[in-house]
Image (cartoon, helix red, strand yellow):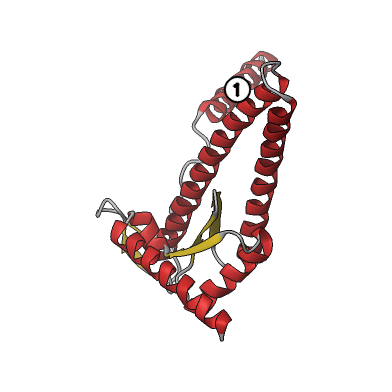
Amino acid sequence: MMLKKQTVWLLTMLSLVVVLSVYYVTSPGDQASPFVPDGDADMVLGEDGEQWVLEEDVDVNAEAVEGELFEVLRMQLQDERNALKEQLTAKVASNEFTSSEKNEAFNEMDELVKMASKEAMMETMIKALDYQDALVRTDENQVLITVIAEEHSKADANALIQLARQEFGDTKQVNVKFQSNEASAEGDSEAGAESEEVTEDITENLDQVEGE
């Protein structure tokens, strides 16, 4: 009789263990734990105006927004170039074009690859100068450089223009545009227009500096 009671008790405990195991397996994981910032952390209202968040988190989100925007622009440019490459590849493989036309198409494809490589290299060099992020695009005879920086000067722009001329040559006009995280995240068109005007002024001043 005692052995039977022990068996029933053991089966009951095993059943309880199984039930608890199933509960923990099926329950949502990584539930948010309460977070208590340290005494030095500054709290600000979030975008919804209701929830308080760390101020440094707001800065990180702004950088993430700009980084995502740059990635979208890079992907769009890559898609456009891939479509052009497909057209040029079809032209090279077609019997409807002359050898001269095929060679021209092949050279154009080679130029696209070289430009993409130079753009990526230029972005890497700019970020190596401690800038938060950079987007470099070539458009016919122009090199368009957009840099994320909270502080900048004409000397900074001149340095980037010189760097671009070393990478792309002197035949292309270089335009440098600085943006802050705040202006980028808010999509402030007025701030963008102001940056473009400064860029034109910087380009003119660079020629004067070189003349001296």
In the rendered structure, the answer to whether residue 96 lies left or right of residue 79 reads right
Question: In the figure, 81 relative to 142: above or below?
Answer: above
In depth, the one of 211 and 190 nearer the eye is 211
User: Can residue 86 be seen here?
Assistant: yes
Image point 55% across, 53% down: which residue?
Answer: 141
Image point 57% across, 80% down: which residue?
Answer: 210
**Under tag 1, what secondary structure?**
helix
Outermost left residue: 49
Image point 65% across, 48% down: which residue?
Answer: 115
How many marks the image carries: the answer is: 1
In depth, the one of 68 and 18 nearer the eye is 68
Q: Position of residue 2 (x, y in %)?
A: 67, 17
In the rendered structure, the answer to whether residue 71 lies left or right of residue 198 reads right
Q: The C terminus lies in which quarter of the figure?
A: bottom right
Question: In the figure, 160 relative to 90: above or below?
Answer: below
Q: Position of residue 90 (x, y in %)?
A: 66, 21
How crowded pointer 1 is (Cα within 10 Å; few <14, some 14-19, many 20+) is rated as few
Question: In the figure, 207 relative to 71: above or below?
Answer: below
In depth, the one of 167 and 194 nearer the eye is 167
In depth, the one of 174 and 70 nearer the eye is 174
Displayed quadrant of residue 188: bottom left
Displayed quadrant of residue 127: bottom right
The residue indicated by pointer 1 is: 18
> What amino acid type is highlighted by mark number 1?
Val
User: Can residue 35 be seen here?
Assistant: no
Displayed quadrant of residue 12: top right
In the rendered structure, the answer to whether residue 76 lies left or right of residue 103 reads left
Q: Position of residue 88 (x, y in %)?
A: 64, 28
Q: The N terminus lies in which quarter of the figure?
A: top right
